[in-house]
Amino acid sequence: MLIDQSKGSEMADIDSSLEGWFTDPYGLHDARWLSEGKPTHLVRDGATEGSDPAPDEPFKVTPVRLGDDPERGDGSDLRRADDAERQPGFDEAKATRGAWDAFDQSNP
């Protein structure tokens, strides 16, 4: 067992490189975010995320890493900051033609 010097309570021997969602070691929520192997105030119950300070008590269970969140996707829906640079630039002739076309349609 390691002693958490900040709280003075016993903690399970947890790898300090762990980061991510794990089962809540206190059994209060579905999941708790671990940062550097330490529980944080970030919790999750189902799809609802919230904040609940980690209790000043020993772990009730050993935290287990949770799989990826299926609602988050693979990132294919995200846009890159340089996406605008990849698209064709402004074409003044097309814009002018579009304006005249709109004018022609609105004025029979």
Image: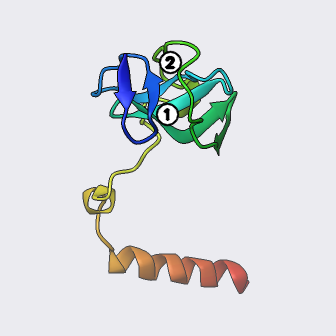
Between the C-alphas of marks 1 and 2, the distance is: 10 Å
Q: How many marks?
A: 2
The amino acid type, in three-letter code, at marker 2 is Leu
Q: Quadrant of the N terminus?
A: top left
The residue sitting at 33% across, 74% down in the picture is 91
Left or right of 68? Residue 30 is right
Mark 2 neighbour density, 10 Å: few (under 14) some (14–19) many (20 or more): few
Residue 88 percent coordinates (x, y):
29, 62
Residue 69 location, x and y as percent?
54, 26
Is disc 1 surrounded by few (<14), some (14 to 19) or many (20+) residues within 10 Å? Answer: many
Name the residue tied to disc 2. Answer: 66
Q: Which element carries disc 1, helix, strand or loop?
A: strand
Q: Which residue is mark 1?
A: 33
Write down the quadrant of residue 52 in the picture. Answer: top right
Query: Which residue is at a point 57% across and 29% down the rendered structure image?
Result: 57
In depth, the one of 38 and 47 nearer the eye is 38
